[in-house]
């Protein structure tokens, strides 16, 4: 044994072990950096999708209000259902949450439920059913609140979501601000009852 580990081979073995250790550590850092860059890019895309959803939600409100007030010309467009229900943006957001950010699943489910309430009112308006304008406006405002809450959750938990934290951190859950329909100016509440 003494002949195998002589004074000249021991430093070589230690150097080789250190080189192997450095190789694996550097590979881990490179893989982590690449994953952080990818998740940061996807988080930015999700944030932009939420911003676009917010903008399209306002446009959708104006279109539904026009339809409810008797202007049904928008319904002649074959793509009116896609743009009123915002299916493409919602599917994009679902993809980001499921593939990259499962920690946002509960917030997304709440957003989805709020959107379903809005979609139910849109369906009623398209079927020329009368709707309670105050309840309908509240559902539109609530959905906007859920969008804002999810955006806040993205910002508050950015480092945790992209994996930048080396040490564990608590996840900050955001809740939507409650909005009342009576906060909307009366000229914007014109829906047939």
Image (cartoon, helix red, strand yellow):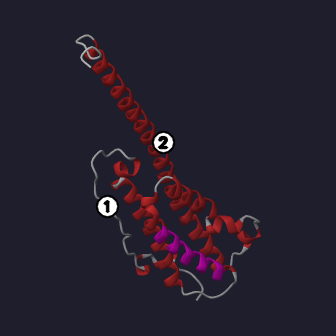
| Disc number placed over residue 172 in the picture, else none | 1
Magenta highlight on residue 140? no
Give the CA separation, mark 2 to mark 1.
22 Å
Judge from the rendering whether residue 154 lies leftward or rightward of residue 63; answer left or right: left
Question: First in sequence: mark 2 or mark 1?
Answer: 2
The C terminus sits in image quarter: bottom right
Q: Does residue 60 sit above or below 38 in this rendering? A: below
Q: Does residue 190 sit above or below 60 in this rendering? A: below
Between 185 and 86, the one nearer to me in the picture: 86
Residue range of the region highlighted in magenta in the rendering? 109-125
Image point (37%, 50%), residue name: 158
Q: Quadrant of residue 149?
A: bottom left
Image point (42%, 62%), residue name: 150
Image point (35%, 54%), residue name: 157
Tell me residue 37's x, y (percent): 44, 39
Q: Residue furthest top?
A: 8
Q: Are marks 2 and 1 in contact (CB under 8 Å)?
A: no
Judge whether residue 4 can be spotted in this image.
Answer: yes
Q: Which residue is mark 2?
A: 38
Report the label total. Answer: 2
């Amino acid at each position: 044994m003494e002949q195998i580990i002589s004074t000249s081979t021991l430093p070589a073995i230690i150097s080789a072990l250190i080189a192997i250790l450095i190789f694996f550590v550097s590979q881990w850092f490179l893989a982590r950096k690449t994953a952080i860059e990818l998740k940061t890019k996807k988080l930015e895309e999700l944030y932009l999708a939420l911003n676009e959803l917010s903008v399209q939600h306002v446009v959708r409100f104006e279109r539904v209000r026009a339809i409810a007030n008797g202007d049904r010309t928008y319904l002649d467009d074959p793509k009116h259902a896609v743009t009123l229900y915002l299916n493409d943006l919602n599917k994009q957001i679902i993809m980001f949450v499921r593939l990259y950010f499962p920690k946002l699943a509960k917030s997304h489910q709440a957003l989805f439920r709020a959107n379903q309430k809005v979609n139910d009112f849109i369906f009623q308006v398209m079927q020329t059913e009368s709707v309670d304008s105050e309840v309908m406006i509240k559902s539109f405002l609530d959905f906007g609140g859920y969008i804002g809450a999810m955006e806040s959750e993205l910002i508050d938990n950015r480092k945790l979501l992209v994996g930048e934290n080396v040490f564990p951190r608590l996840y900050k859950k955001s809740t939507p601000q409650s909005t009342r329909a009576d906060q909307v100016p009366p000229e914007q509440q014109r829906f047939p009852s």
